Every structure is written in structure tokens, then in C-alpha cells.
Image (cartoon, rainbow, N blue to C red):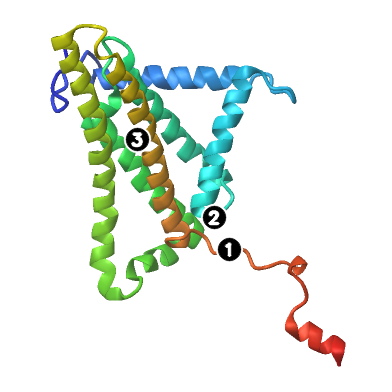
Amino acid sequence: MIGSPLVLEPLFSIGPVPITSPVVVTWAIIAALWAFCALATRRLAMRPTRAQAVLEIVVGAIDGQIRDTMQTEPGPYRALIGTIFLYVLVANWSSLIPGIEPPTAHLETDAALALVVFCATIAYGIAVRGLGGYLKTFADPSWIMIPLNVVEQITRTFSLIVRLFGNVMSGVFVIAIVLSLAGLLVPIPLMALDLLTGAVQAYIFAVLATVFVGAAVGGEGGPPPAPPTAAAGPSPKDSERKTS
């Protein structure tokens, strides 16, 4: 039975800290992802195994998305964006396991993920621009916009929470209601749709995190493109010198 997403009963406590079901499921997801990556990268080879090939496809897709969105090399941001995407994806799909509620169907988990993105945006912005340069972005295009830019920084964090929570929680409730009314086999098409929805929500969350970080480190379009190289041909001034 699906309980209220706003009320969590602790399963047990570690000292004064209560441990709830989403925390336990999150630990299991972290352990599963760590085990898969450890096994896939234990013996890397030029001829990859199936696990290594899957891992390379995932990493390549994440790198491509970061490169296309931020117009920069993905190395410094791969760990953050990749971890967010993989965790949200597996957490959303965990709803298909009988008796498991996805951690992303609870506000606490979604708020923690959004807080990670919020703090990472500030950290990357300061690391790339410096403290003064990052603070100046709040005065863009004019100092009058400072309050609005600060509010935008906060509200878009809340939008991450609400978007992920609403979509995942609605899917869990619909499947639970249909299952209780119609039996075991009828919700199967809805479960397939839930797989698609979970993947889309993980992708959207990761892309929005990339956009927010990209805006912090290099403006709305990411870092400025590199200047043209010498391969682009001689400049007009060089041509004038040669003709003279």
C-alpha cells in the first residue's frame, strides 16, 4: 500500500537519526551503481565486454549532452551530471520492484537533489569566474535586476523539486490504484509507460542541472566559443601585406 509522500515512518534509528524507507532504498541504489561501475571498469580493454560497452555508451551520451549544452569540455562536470542522471533514473525505475517506493516520489529526496544542484551551481560559478565575477552575474543586465536574479536562483531550485516529485508520485499512485482495482496484469502497459516517464524525468533533471551550471560558469549559452584557428585562412590584413 502506498502511503502519503508527506508522512514518513522511520524504519529504525542510528543513534538520534531516524532512517526512513527512501534512505534505505537510496543506499541500495548507491551500492548497486557502485558495484556495476566497479565490475565494468575492473578490467578495461580495447575490446570491451558487454558491461564495459554499456558503461561507455552511457558516459559518451552524458559527455555529448554536457558538451552540446555548455559548449565546453565535459570533464569537470561529468561526475556531477552523470551521477545525478544515473541515480534519478534508477530511483524512478525502482518503483517497478514490488513493495518498493521510489525515493524520488518523496519530497525529501527531491529537495536533497535540488539542493545539490543549487550548491554545485554556486561552487562551479565561483570556481570558474571567481567570487566577484560570479556575484556580478546577478547584476546582469543591470543592477536593478539583482533582486529578480536572486529570486530566480531560488525559484528554479523549487521548480526542480516540484517537477520531479509531481511526475514520479503521480505515476506511482496511478499504478497502485489500477493494481488495486483491476488486478495484476492490467497495469502492465502503465508500468511500461512508467519506465519511459522515469527515463524522461531523469533526462530532464540532468539537462536542467547542466543548464543551470552552464549559466553560472559562462552565461546563458555557456562559455564563449574558442577563437578561430589559423586553419580558417589568412586574415584580410595578411592578404594586403602579401599583395603590397
Pair 1/3: label in front: 3
Q: How crowded is mark 2: few (under 14 residues within 10 Å), some or many (20 or more)?
A: some
Q: How crowded is mark 3: few (under 14 residues within 10 Å), some or many (20 or more)?
A: many
Residue 179 appears at what percent x and percent y?
19, 12
Give amino acid for label 2.
Answer: Gln
Instruction: Give the residue pinned by disc 3.
Output: 201
Q: Residues within 10 Å of mark 1 (few under 14, many from 20)?
A: few
Residue at the (29%, 43%) spot, across then down: 160
Residue at the (75%, 86%) spot, across then down: 237
Mark with earlier residue (1, 3): 3
Most extreme residue toward the top, as rendered? 184
Quarter occupied by residue 165: top left
The front one of 191 and 37 is 191
The front one of 108 and 193 is 193
Mark 1 → mark 2, Cα distance in angstroms: 7 Å
Asked if residue 121 can be seen in this view, the reply is yes
Q: How many marks?
A: 3
Residue 99 appears at what percent x and percent y?
26, 10
Give amino acid for label 1.
Answer: Pro
Instruction: Give the residue pinned by disc 1.
Output: 225
Q: Quadrant of the N terminus?
A: top left
Mark 3 lies on a secondary structure that is helix
Give amino acid for label 3.
Answer: Gln
Residue 154 appears at what percent x and percent y?
25, 52
Residue 168 appears at what percent x and percent y?
26, 29
Q: In which quarter of the image is the C terminus?
A: bottom right
Residue at the (80%, 88%) spot, across then down: 240
Q: In this view, does 224 lie to the left or right of 1?
A: right
Mark 1 lies on a secondary structure that is loop
Instruction: Give the residue pinned by disc 2.
Output: 71
